[in-house]
Amino acid sequence: MDRPSVVGASFLHQVIHSGTDVFTKQGLSLPFINVVSPEISKFLMGSDVRVDLYTVSRAIVLSLLIDKVIEMCHRLYFDPNHDNKRLYDARTMKILMYSNTMSSVINLGYVGITRDMRRFDFGGIMKTLYMLFHNQKKINEIKDEFIRKTIDGELQKEEDEINQRLAQLGYSI
């Protein structure tokens, strides 16, 4: 507590130490898995499975890169005169969710058929699960906002028509 620089230096030293283990033959296990179960960690780090921090990180980064390319290609078709930007973004999220889900299902099928656990895309599946829960919540919020604005606009239009009719009859509100 008296010397925060020691904590920072210790953290930096641990990062460097862990970084040297990433590319070794044994690799660096996923954080906190060993705390939960050393047996699971040993199984994941075995030569038959090989799920370590490097392979998972690489899979997630590659998946993010592919998603960004898909998103940019989809954005090329955006027409500001015709499309609502928020709804178009929701469509993009749906496309990415579907493509990631299909990719994960295909990977699971391939691993199931070949029984080659080294081809299991743990990072891609983690990202897909995150997207399914996180993006669906965002998509629902965008849809709710659009529906609420549409209904509010329709109600305002009806209210204006009623006020015009009342004004024609000599009443004002």
Image (cartoon, helix red, strand yellow):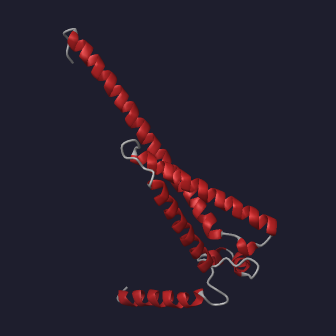
Decide if residue 142 is on the left or right side of residue 33. Answer: left
- Quadrant where the N terminus lies? bottom left
In this figure, what is the number of numbered marks?
0
Q: Is residue 114 above or below residue 105?
A: below
x 39%, y 34%: residue: 150
- Quadrant where the C terminus lies? top left
Q: Nearer the viewer, residue 161 or 17?
A: 161
Picture quarter containing residue 103?
A: bottom right
Measured as percent of width and height from the top left, residue 138 is found at: 47, 51
Measured as percent of width and height from the top left, residue 54 is found at: 59, 80
Decide if residue 162 is on the left or right side of residue 29. Answer: left
- On the question of residue 110 being in view, the answer is yes
Picture quarter containing residue 2?
A: bottom left
- On the question of residue 133 being in view, the answer is no
x 70%, y 77%: residue: 44
Measured as percent of width and height from the top left, residue 14 is found at: 50, 88
x 72%, y 80%: residue: 42
Measured as percent of width and height from the top left, residue 108 is found at: 72, 63
Q: Is residue 89 above or below residue 124?
A: above
Q: Nearer the viewer, residue 9 or 60?
A: 60
x 57%, y 55%: residue: 97
Q: Is residue 166 above or below residue 81?
A: above
Q: Is residue 14 above or below residue 167?
A: below
